[in-house]
Amino acid sequence: MKRVSLKLDRNRYDIHIGPGALGQAGRWLEESGLGGKLVIITNPIVNELYGGSLKQQLAKGGAEVVVLEVPDGEEQKSLETAGRLYHELTSHHVERTTPILALGGGVIGDLAGFVAATYLRGVPLVPIPTTLLAQVDSSLGGKVAVNHGQLKNQVGAFYQPRLVISDTDTLKTLPPPELTNGLAEVIKSAAIRDSGFFAYLEANMERIKALDGGVLEEVVFRSAHIKAEVVAKDEKDTGLRGILNYGHTIGHALETASDFGLGHGEAVAIGMLAAGRISCQMGLLQSGELDRLKRLVEKAGLPARMPALDLARLTAAMTHDKKISGGKIRMVLLKSIGSAAITDQVSGELIEQALRG
Ligand SMILES: NC(=O)c1ccc[n+]([C@@H]2O[C@H](COP(=O)([O-])OP(=O)(O)OC[C@H]3O[C@@H](n4cnc5c(N)ncnc54)[C@H](O)[C@@H]3O)[C@@H](O)[C@H]2O)c1
Ligand SMILES: [Zn+2]
């Protein structure tokens, strides 16, 4: 079992990572002073796989456990579903000290986190992420949100959890495309911050795909470590934290322009390589390093080529993206494998060239 500590200005919390971590949830909750009544928010798929044993374990330890299910799917990240959950929390007499455990992927994490941040002006939140994306990215850093209209994550808060429990064994039941999806964020973390980890991924990608327990633990640990370190330096996302958007400026435009035919991980993979090409063109990155990134993306089973999309729509989607400062497009570029920089100095011409592939 491994542990990452996220140290913020006003508080700190632990992220427990490893195979079988779920089995120790009761102990860690107790150590954090959380008990009595507990609410688990989850979906039917994850509840069926992991909810029952978690509930049993916590009840055995003397807790009163309330399980609230929401249907699976991104469309549940809504004010409507949050409203329904508030209603249920009230009917179960949930108090300000009652923790909410968010058991599931990023959708459950963002929704249950938003509910925890706002119900009674905030109840303790404990994410128990069960997808690779959630374990390495969405459960860490305190961003919680729901979608509003067509706009993703439009209504939300910064709300830090009390602890995070990442059981890497849960990744073994993930549909393979979901594992691949999360690998885009893993590769991103290594590419922007840790060349040693990048080399580790190059050497171990087959073992990750084969769900080797020790390798999965190491991958989640090292990715979480990178995110925790970046968030600790810039909790409210006003500077350094922007490097976590590597591949995302172009990636988000690709998701939009493909009408979400491209998955998030796929779009980020293509976006990372496009930003990599721009980095080379601007003389920041050596082409050999870009080749390494491309090979690793392909090894992970992610796409590397720009799909045939309408260039005008792509460009329009990019200029509407929120990662724009003062009318200029803000992008994360690579200086080398393991080192990134944020700039608004990329010319429109270079961006267009990168979007052409
Ligand atoms: N808050 C943040 O900082 C942040 C960062 C990145 C992404 N996000 C958000 O995360 C969401 C995407 O999260 P996601 O990729 O985890 O998707 P998800 O939550 O939809 O999960 C993907 C699928 O896997 C299923 N699943 C979850 N765990 C499983 C398991 N162990 N075994 C089998 N099936 C399992 C889910 O039911 C779902 O069908 C998006 O809404 C995105 O906006 C938030
Ligand atoms: Zn992402």
Image (cartoon, rainbow, N blue to C red):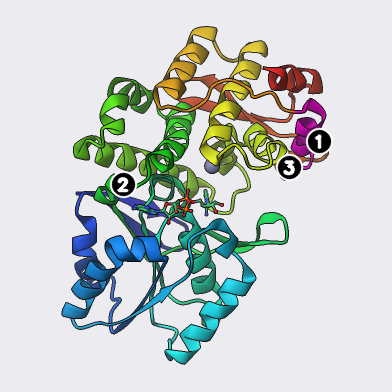
**Magenta-highlighted residues:** 310-321
- The residue that disc 1 covers is 316
**Marks 2 and 1 close (CB-CB < 8 Å):** no
Q: Disc 2 versus disc 1: distance between alpha carbons? A: 36 Å
Asked which secondary structure carries label 2, the reply is helix
In the rendered image, the vertical position of residue 247 relative to residue 142, given as above or below: above
- The residue that disc 2 covers is 171
Q: Does label 2 or label 1 sit earlier along the sequence? A: 2
Please provide percent x and percent y for residue 165: 31, 58
Q: Does label 2 or label 3 sit earlier along the sequence? A: 2
Identity, as a three-letter code, of the amino acid under mark 1? Ala
Mark 3 residue crowding within 10 angstroms, few (<14) / some (14–19) / many (20+):
some
Q: Residue at x 61, y 36 (%)?
A: 248
Foreground tag (1 vs 3): 1
Identity, as a three-letter code, of the amino acid under mark 3? Asp
Q: Looking at this view, is 185 or 107 the one in front?
A: 107
Mark 1 residue crowding within 10 angstroms, few (<14) / some (14–19) / many (20+):
few
Is residue 61 in view from this perspective?
Answer: no
